Image: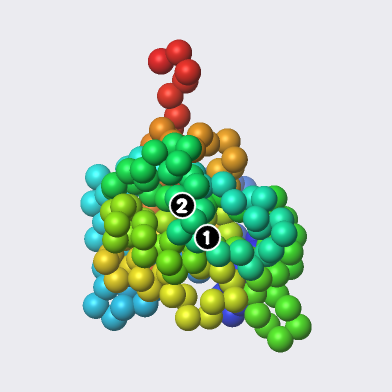
């Protein structure tokens, strides 16, 4: 599993066995931001919300999928632009308020190759695509989206060491989902996503099970 540089690796320890205890049990530890996860405002803001403060209704949202796979094939540092949003809206209509904007970059295909997924260069800079600040501001402030999700390790391009889009979104505060998979299976509009969390007290985030619900064509 790709890990953000410096994050602790997952660890599992046997705790009980059927032969000795009559049941099987392990204990585990992992980063709050391991795998598919939600990032809470407390990640960047000392007084920000923690992951245990989300109400269930905040974790069920409509979603739109913005496909930039073609751009990302040519440029691994590609950042979504306002023009990309305008092009998407010319086909599918305005991005709905209170929806989560999901960015389909194609990076999930690299998941089993951490070096390719993170794109770390010889000086330690990461290279993967994400939301550009202009597009992020448009979606947050003019369209009123509930947050962002992506199939990469971060909502802003990897080379952005300031976490500009994360800070912008979480200052509002909105939702951030990272390391998503199977976005290519979703329609551009019409999906509903359900975010399952661990309600970790004072958590900066949580591993998440994100499920998309899509109506069948005949329903």
**Of residues 200 and 162, which is closer to you in this image?**
162
Question: Residue 147, labelled with which disc?
Answer: none
| Residue 11 appears left or right of 53 | right
Q: Is residue 10 visible?
A: no
Q: CA distance from mark 1 to mark 2?
A: 8 Å
At x 28% / y 64%, what residue is drawn?
173
> First in sequence: mark 1 or mark 2?
1
Quick check: marks 1 and 2 in contact, CB under 8 Å? yes
Residue position for label 2 = 85
Residue position for label 1 = 80
**Of residues 99 and 181, which is closer to you in this image?**
99
* Label 1 packing within 10 angstroms: few (<14), some (14-19), many (20+): many
* Farthest residue, direction bottom: 123
Measuring from the top left, give residue 8's x and y in whole percent.
57, 74
Give the quarter of the figure containing the C terminus. Answer: top left
Measuring from the top left, give residue 191's x and y in whole percent.
42, 35
**Of residues 187 and 132, which is closer to you in this image?**
132
Query: On the image, which quarter does residue 159 sit in?
Result: bottom right
Q: Secondary structure at mark 2?
A: helix
Give the quarter of the figure containing the N terminus. Answer: bottom right
**Of residues 135 and 175, which is closer to you in this image?**
135
């Amino acid at each position: 599993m790709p890990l953000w540089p410096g994050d602790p690796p997952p660890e599992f320890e046997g705790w009980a066995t059927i032969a000795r205890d009559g049941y099987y049990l392990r204990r585990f530890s992992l980063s709050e931001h391991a795998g598919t996860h939600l990032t809470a405002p407390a990640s960047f803001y000392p007084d920000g919300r923690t992951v245990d403060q989300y109400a269930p209704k905040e974790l069920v949202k409509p979603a739109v999928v913005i496909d930039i796979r073609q751009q990302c094939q040519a440029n691994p540092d590609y950042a979504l632009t306002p023009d990309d949003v305008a092009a998407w809206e010319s086909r599918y209509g305005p991005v709905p308020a209170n929806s989560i904007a999901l960015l389909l970059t194609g990076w999930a295909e690299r998941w089993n190759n951490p070096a390719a997924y993170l794109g770390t260069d010889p000086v330690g800079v990461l290279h993967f695509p994400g939301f550009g600040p202009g597009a992020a501001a448009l979606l947050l402030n003019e369209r009123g989206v509930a947050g962002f999700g992506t199939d990469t390790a971060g909502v802003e391009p990897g080379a952005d060491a300031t976490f500009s889009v994360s800070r912008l979104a979480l200052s509002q505060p909105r939702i951030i989902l990272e390391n998503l998979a199977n976005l290519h299976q979703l329609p551009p509009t019409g999906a509903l996503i359900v975010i399952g969390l661990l309600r970790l007290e004072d958590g900066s985030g949580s591993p998440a099970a994100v499920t998309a619900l899509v109506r069948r064509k005949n329903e």
